[in-house]
């Protein structure tokens, strides 16, 4: 467990890569207000997928508040336990603000997290937590932490915020938007798959394992967790949304059966309908997809993920008989048209999503 406070904390932040972000996330003010609210005894949890700025947000909050002697940054490891964390908190009673990063690396966080709120937050300690296994934080909200945790969502980065922080164009946003990186996460299908495995699939399976330990896992998700093909299943399920999106763009010009084999359609098997239904709920909970007003339609909160899979699907079309029958001098025009239609449809979804989320928030706020 790494612990920084006082002068060591300031020195660490002075050398941190997070200094490259001169602009702050839109949710920064909400988190800062929560931390300094003397009537708030809830833990603040930065809830989002990997590479969406959770650690950078923590460091910005510490750096801007300049209260180093009464602030601690703790980074947990897999070797640590929740009791190790509580020992550190007990030994540093003078600290008022605790920022605990990678808290879900601890195997027993889920079982022992209630003390964090019941004892330390209730004593007036201001606690901000984050972890790569974000689903576990969401599940903890309904388990050990109950109503004692407030989630601040980091995954969704609207275009205006993306442009302000990374100075990106709308084309950049469509092709690689969704993380606070220069675009390398979604620059290829292979890298996109690596991100999905780490940020979504491993995250999801880790959270489901916590429910399994508590004997609170549904039968359908239990089948998924015990399946040695679980990672492939989740990947194909996510891919299925983008394949449907691609089919609408192609509009019957190609036969997808020439590209994908029967094993790629495992999610559509009637036997697995229950798993698919549960998976969709989890992906919504994890801020991967967002339900549109039209029943069954889903929009990806990270456009770069969709675009990377679309590029792979369109490249796969080159293997089809229909593609080979297109005159050579016309193929470039067809590719250009597919790219144009993809970006136009994605832009429509981006604008629609921003509008829909604003309306839903207004309705939720009353």
Image (spheres, rainbow, N blue to C red):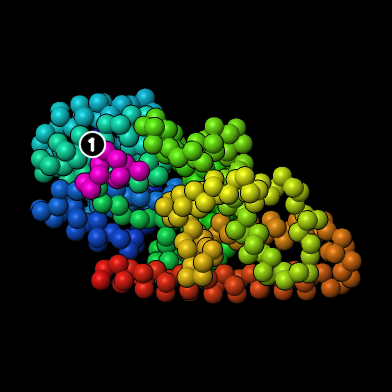
Q: Is residue 77 visible?
A: no
Residue 110: horizontal and vertical position, in percent? 32, 34
Q: Is residue 89 visible?
A: yes
Residue 271: horizontal and vertical position, in percent? 62, 45
| Helix, strand or loop for the magenta stretch, by majority | loop
Identify the residue at horizontal 65%, vertical 48% (top origin): 269
Residue 288: horizontal and vertical position, in percent? 48, 55
**Span colored in magenta:** 139-148
**Front residue of 134 and 92:** 134
Whether residue 83 sits left or right of residue 291 in the image: it is left
Whether residue 242 sits left or right of residue 125 in the image: it is right
Q: Is residue 239 positioned above or below 79 on the image?
A: below
Whether residue 15 sits left or right of residue 34 in the image: it is right
Identify the residue at horizontal 24%, vertical 56% (top origin): 31
Residue 27: horizontal and vertical position, in percent? 30, 60
Identify the residue at horizontal 42%, vertical 52% (top origin): 285
Report crowding for label 1: few under 14, some 14 to 19, many 20 or more residues within 10 A (C-alpha). some
Label 1, on which residue?
A: 114
Name the quarter where the N terminus is drawn.
top left
- Residue 298 is a magenta residue: no
- Residue 145 is a magenta residue: yes
**Front residue of 212 and 105:** 212
Tell me which corner region of the image, top left, top right, bottom left or bottom right, holds residue 75. top left
């Amino acid at each position: 467990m790494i612990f920084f406070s006082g002068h060591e904390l300031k020195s660490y932040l002075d050398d941190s890569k997070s200094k490259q972000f001169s602009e702050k996330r839109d949710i920064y003010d909400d988190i800062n207000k929560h931390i300094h609210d003397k009537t708030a005894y809830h833990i603040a949890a930065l809830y989002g997928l990997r590479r969406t700025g959770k650690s950078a947000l923590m460091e910005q909050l510490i750096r801007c508040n300049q209260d180093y002697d009464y602030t601690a940054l703790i980074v947990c490891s897999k070797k640590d336990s929740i009791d190790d964390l509580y020992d550190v908190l007990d030994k540093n009673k003078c600290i008022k603000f605790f920022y605990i990063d990678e808290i879900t690396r601890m195997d027993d966080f889920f079982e022992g997290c209630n003390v964090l709120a019941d004892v330390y937050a209730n004593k007036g300690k201001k606690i901000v937590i984050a972890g790569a296994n974000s689903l576990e934080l969401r599940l903890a909200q309904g388990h050990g932490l109950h109503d004692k945790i407030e989630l601040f969502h980091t995954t969704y980065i609207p275009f205006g915020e993306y442009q302000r922080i990374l100075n990106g164009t709308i084309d950049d946003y469509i092709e690689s938007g969704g993380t606070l990186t220069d675009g390398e996460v979604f620059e290829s299908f292979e890298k996109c798959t690596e991100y999905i495995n780490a940020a979504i699939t491993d995250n999801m399976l880790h959270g489901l394992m916590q429910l399994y330990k508590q004997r609170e896992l549904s039968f359908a998700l239990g089948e998924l967790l015990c399946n040695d093909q679980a990672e492939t299943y989740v990947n194909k399920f996510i891919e299925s949304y983008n394949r449907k999106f691609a089919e609408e763009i192609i509009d019957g010009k190609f036969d997808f059966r020439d590209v994908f084999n029967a094993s790629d359609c495992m999610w559509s098997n009637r036997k697995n309908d229950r798993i698919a239904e549960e998976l969709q709920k989890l992906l919504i909970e994890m801020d991967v997809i967002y339900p549109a007003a039209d029943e069954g339609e889903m929009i990806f909160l990270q456009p770069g993920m969709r675009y990377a899979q679309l590029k792979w699907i369109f490249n796969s079309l080159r293997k089809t008989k229909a593609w080979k029958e297109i005159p050579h001098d016309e193929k470039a025009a067809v590719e250009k048209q597919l790219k144009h239609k993809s970006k136009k449809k994605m832009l429509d979804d981006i604008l629609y999503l921003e509008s829909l989320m604003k309306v839903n928030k207004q309705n939720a706020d009353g």
